[in-house]
Structures are given as structure tokens and as C-alpha cells.
Image (cartoon, rainbow, N blue to C red):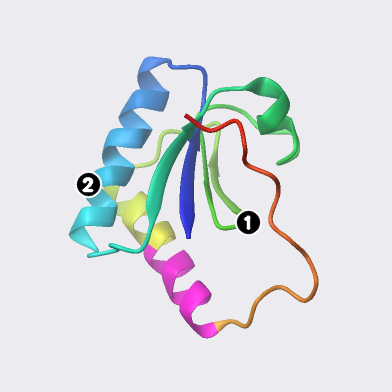
Amino acid sequence: MDAIVMGLGCTRCSRLKQMTEEVLRDLGANGVTLKNMNALDAMAQYGPMLMPALVMGDCLLISGVMPTKERLTRLIRERLLTEETAPAAAGRPPPQTDPVS
């Protein structure tokens, strides 16, 4: 699964990426690849949102807020558990994520 931090490089976007790296490491989520996305047209496919934003798999977890580390941990843990227990979305592919740096 990919985790994608979306933003234009502001301080909050950088901080969200750093916190996400820490949380993934703390949770032992070795199977998650963390990426950055800063192309507005690519971000638009995820729907209207504010930056910074965090997407895991095909799920928007954060948009326009800077969560506490505790809240981010809870959101990521819940998403990882959902991914482990839920069958793949019925015929719905995740959004295209080519312009990722």
C-alpha cells in the first residue's frame, strides 16, 4: 500500500510527511511506501481538498488540517487494519498516482 502526502512543499506539508514516517515506523508498517505528490492536476483526482493531505490506498485520511501525532497514529492504524480485513474494493481501482516524487 502507498501513503501519499500531498502538498506544495509548505512547512505543514513537510511536517505531515515527517510525522507520517515516524508513525509508520512506530507501527512497524514496513509494507507501506511513503510518497510525495505536488502536482495539482494529480491531486485533483482525489476530489476537492485542502493541503496538507494524506491518502493511504484509496482513502483520504487527512485534508487541510495538521493532526496531532496521536490522531495520525489512530487514523493510520485504523486504515492498516481495514486494509488487512476488508476485501478489495469491488471493481474500483485506486486513483492514478503517476506524478509522485
Helix, strand or loop under label 1: loop
Q: Say above or below: 23 vs 63.
A: below
The amino acid type of the residue labelled 1 equals: Asp
Residue placed under numbered mark 2 in the picture: 22
Alpha carbon distance from label 1 to label 2: 21 Å
Helix, strand or loop under label 2: helix
- Asked if residue 81 lies in the magenta stretch, the reply is yes
Task: Specify whether 20 is left or right of 52.
Answer: left
Q: Nearer the viewer, residue 31 or 23?
A: 31
Q: Where in the figure is residue 52, as x and y percent of width and height? A: 50, 29
Start-end of magenta stretch: 77-85
Look at the numbered discs 1 and 2 and tell me whether their residues touch, using CB distance below 8 Å.
Answer: no
Task: Specify whether 29 is left or right of 75.
Answer: left
Task: Specify whether 99 is left or right of 3.
Answer: right
Residue placed under numbered mark 1 in the picture: 58
Residue at 21% across, 55% down: 25
